[in-house]
Image (tube, rainbow, N blue to C red):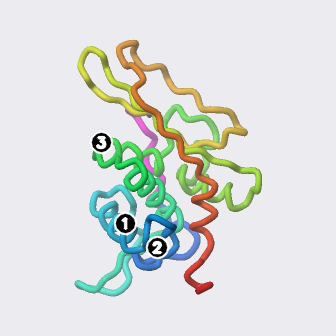
Amino acid sequence: MTDDPITPLFAHDEPGPRFTVAEASKRLEEPGVPADTLASQIRSFAQRRLVHVRGTKGSGRTAHNLYALSDLAAAKVLSVLTSDLSLSDNKVMEAVSLALYTWDADMPLPAKHANSPVLTALAHTLSDADAWWVFDLRAHRSDQTGERRFRIRLYDPRNGIPKDKPLPDEFQPRAAVTIQLRPLLIRLASDRAAAN
């Protein structure tokens, strides 16, 4: 990621239904990550502003936050990093959230598309049986100052791997995480709770 992202595009009203935490956690649950764990994670992600709230249902102390389908996808990626890899570093999670919701200034097409990266990945996955979007996180550390920088991309490899602006030579690769998004996105798009 560069230091100058394009203005976030997630503030617009997205199409589709809205989900409470209870509804979202039911859609996101899977073996090993039950709904109650996901509900706690979603609440935490929202409080930390890692997942965006699209509105509320009700009022006062009983009001429920509402999330769009793309917010569920963002929560699922963050959940995988938290549950499967035990990542909890706030700087990493903030960088991931920014990459999910905001196109990087040097990102090639579809960066000019009105949707956020996570919504674009979701829409393409649900409409194209051959789409296989990838979440890719690469961590670099300066061998002089210890500063960390992250390169995070969502992309469909059919369109090529996005090129990053080069980092200064002092930043050495430290770690990489790749998440295949298609299974996660297809799973959350189906309403399994209604089937029960």
3D distance between C-alphas at marks 2 and 1: 8 Å
The reply to whether the C-beta atoms of the residues labelled 2 and 3 are less than 8 Å apart is no
Q: Secondary structure at mark 1?
A: helix
Which residue is rendered at x = 37% and y = 74% of the image? Answer: 36
Q: Which residue type does callout 1 highlight?
A: Ile
Residue 24 shows which numbered tag?
2
Q: Quadrant of the C terminus?
A: bottom right
Q: Earlier in the sequence, mark 2 or mark 3?
A: 2
Closer to the camera, 105 or 52?
A: 52
Q: What segment carries the magenta color?
A: 3-11
Residue 91 shows which numbered tag?
3
Question: Circle 1 sits on which residue?
Answer: 42
Closer to the camera, 177 or 119?
A: 177
Quadrant housing residue 15 = bottom right
Q: Total number of numbered labels?
A: 3
Predominant secondary structure, magenta span: loop
Instruction: Please provide percent x and percent y for residue 162.
Output: 60, 32
Residue 152 visible in the current orientation? no
Q: Quadrant of the N terminus?
A: top left
Residue 115 part of the magenta segment: no
Residue 126 shows which numbered tag?
none
The reply to whether the C-beta atoms of the residues labelled 2 and 1 are less than 8 Å apart is yes
Q: Secondary structure at mark 2?
A: helix
Quadrant housing residue 109 = top right
Q: Which residue type does callout 2 highlight?
A: Ala
